[in-house]
Amino acid sequence: MDGREAVPPTVQADVAVVGGGVVGLGIAWEAARSGRSVVVVDPAPGTGASFAAAGMLAAVSEYHYQEEDLLGLTLESARLWPGFAGSLGAETGYQSTPTLCVAGDAADRQALADLRAVQEAHGLGVRALTVREARSLEPMLAPAIAGAFEISADHQVDPRRLVAAILGRLGEDRIVRRRAQALVWAGGAGDARVVGVLLDDGREVRAGETIVANAIGARDLAGLPVPLPLRPVYGDILRLRVPESLRPLVTATVRGLVRGKPVYLVPREDGTLVIGATQREDGSDAVSAGGVYELLRDAQALVPAVAELELYETTARARPGTPDNAPLLGRVAAGFGPAGAADDGGHVPGLIVATGFFRHGVLLTPAAARICVELLDGRTEERWDAFRPDRFARIPHETHASYGRTA
Amino acid sequence: MDGREAVPPTVQADVAVVGGGVVGLGIAWEAARSGRSVVVVDPAPGTGASFAAAGMLAAVSEYHYQEEDLLGLTLESARLWPGFAGSLGAETGYQSTPTLCVAGDAADRQALADLRAVQEAHGLGVRALTVREARSLEPMLAPAIAGAFEISADHQVDPRRLVAAILGRLGEDRIVRRRAQALVWAGGAGDARVVGVLLDDGREVRAGETIVANAIGARDLAGLPVPLPLRPVYGDILRLRVPESLRPLVTATVRGLVRGKPVYLVPREDGTLVIGATQREDGSDAVSAGGVYELLRDAQALVPAVAELELYETTARARPGTPDNAPLLGRVAAGFGPAGAADDGGHVPGLIVATGFFRHGVLLTPAAARICVELLDGRTEERWDAFRPDRFARIPHETHASYGRTA
């Protein structure tokens, strides 16, 4: 609006969300629905891990031993998904089709059976199928599979459509297509608080609350009161087209274990298929030839007709891993911030962290959004304490010398 | 130049080449160098099989049993390659690096050894290497390979750079970016001849000689005096990037036989690698998931570090196959044309066919160009008679009723 050479104007909002992937957009959507003005800061919304993600909503089949805290969160989010999807109309590709967990060989079957015992101990519904039963449900499964388990509670959404749906609902004027460089702090001793973010074009977004939800990118945001122990876990994802003569290839999401390695096949309504499951920590965001090979090999072991499909896209992206594979979600204890700066709950004022969702970003989006809005409302639930973003840090003896940019 | 609604002008040239792949462009380049004005007709030059091709110049290692006629042509073209590449400067990526033929197992080694006996009987230089010798030349070869043969006469070029080099030399005003619909015939009984092509925008290209060099697309060109028995043989081609830490992955072109299946790995100067060799006649120009899988599997069997590369492009294209796998190259006997229409050599006047090059399009480009220019000069060589484009047709008892569009 101003002249080109003038200092650019500050953007104002009740809530600034840093990060326009599914998590950031989900939070922004719920915050907007709560009546707040919201701005999302992202140079290219929806092009990170959300662009690659298959969109499985797999609280049950993604359960891993010893991850009970996480299970509470994933089940809560799975419960929220239908309502969350419903708030966005039919545009998200949300489908309540079931999930089949398929074993490549006898050892894989034993591993899935052992896991099922733990899943059932947690009250999760897992139905054992014979090979015959599994193949009557999904005739394209290989005759040589060793067994299968049906999980009717695990569903799917299309993350690309979800991103587009939320972006469309928020409106382009709510999206600031710049990179956030640093948190902006204001106030002095006793009343310091986060008041927004500095953009890479020199502008600021000023907001009552700033939510850091930019996945692995949070590592590069200056001015955080605690370091966020995030590491990139790369995955290769294939997108294939099923020729008319082979449709439907499968109707359920097929999650396999093949010689101990996971692979999943997620069928979309439009006749395409998403195949994934590689996890690499090799620092490369390029598609791995070895990863593509293993995905195609293991997918064919479960569904041989995969060889007949068109491979039309290969993608690799980094997901934000944490030391305990659980998210960094909540406010930061005041002790990590400037001396004396604390809100009523004893936290750094103006700041919420929501990252580190690892393999569960899409599944956990409604729960992350719900929890963030509760925090905006001044409410906290003790059961989510396990995810506080400062749990890996120690409160320093002395106050930090500086917090990025101070207004 | 004219008003938008006016009838578009006719394009004039000494020679019209239908098809802007490597073969068509190579012919156009040699025709232009012979002093003729040339026009190339192609809606999207260089985007067909030339876009996918690895660019192996493999007269020796591509030799197949019983294809002696073809061998004469491929050897002639290999002989012409250095001069042809030299006429275009250093821009074509032409490299005289050798080729290693590598056997995956003992049966593959026997097959390569049997072929070598025939190759040597034809005077072709093939050197048997022990596994130790092969791995000292190319340390990234798998220890488990069964043997190798070195063919120093088989080289490579980069077809995409070749296309760009010729397009640049010809100049954009020599390229008509339209589809050729039909041959245009002129004259009546006794002096009928091909005088150019009709474009899909209604314009005509008028030329003293028309050369049909649009690969599989020649099937759709109306007005040909003989049917051209072309079939599409699809191939999947992968392009990968070698990380700095693994360069050079290989220095020679590696052609493998793995459990009886061919695979090749062609290293480029820029640190990329082209992998190919699938042949599909399934009618699909989409990349085959099964094809990609087999290429990666067999390439890793020869060079395990292929798993560490970045897969950045997958392409599928159709090559024009013929019943005897040899090209359709030359003039058409006058008996197939309108009654009485014949040039001094007894052929349909104004028309040359140059298609059906199958797997050998890049290799055969200089020979095709040389032979076409000789035909333009009114010269013919008996040794190329085996490739006459009407060899699968019978001269009809009655004259054809119509030849596409008659001027």
Image (tube, coloured by chain):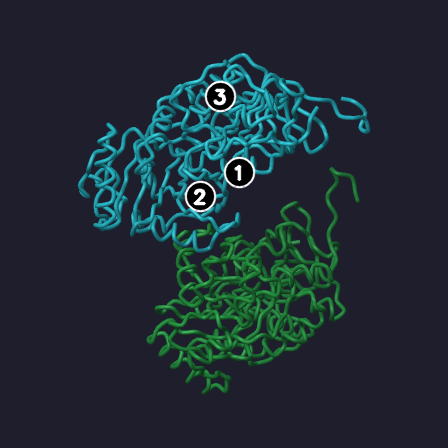
Chain colours: A green, B cyan
Distance of mark 2 from mark 1, alpha carbons?
Answer: 24 Å
Would you identify the image quadrant in which residue B102 lies? top left
Mark 2 and mark 1 lie on one chain; the one further toward the N terminus is 1
> Toward the viewer: B156 or B43?
B43
As shown in the figure, which amino acid type bears the numbered disc 1? Ile
**Label 3 belongs to which residue?**
B372
As shown in the figure, which amino acid type bears the numbered disc 2? Arg
**In the image, residue B58 lies at what x, y percent?**
35, 33
**In the image, residue A130 lies at what x, y percent?**
42, 81
- Asked whether the viewer can see residue B171, the reply is no
**Label 2 belongs to which residue?**
B239
Cβ–Cβ under 8 Å for marks 2 and 1: no
Horizontally, residue B257 falls left or right of residue A182, namely: left
**Label 1 belongs to which residue?**
B216
Mark 3 and mark 1 lie on one chain; the one further toward the N terminus is 1
Circle 2 or circle 1, nearest the eye: 1
Cβ–Cβ under 8 Å for marks 3 and 1: no
Distance of mark 3 from mark 1, alpha carbons?
Answer: 19 Å
Label 3: element kind:
helix
Q: Are marks 3 and 1 on the same chain?
A: yes
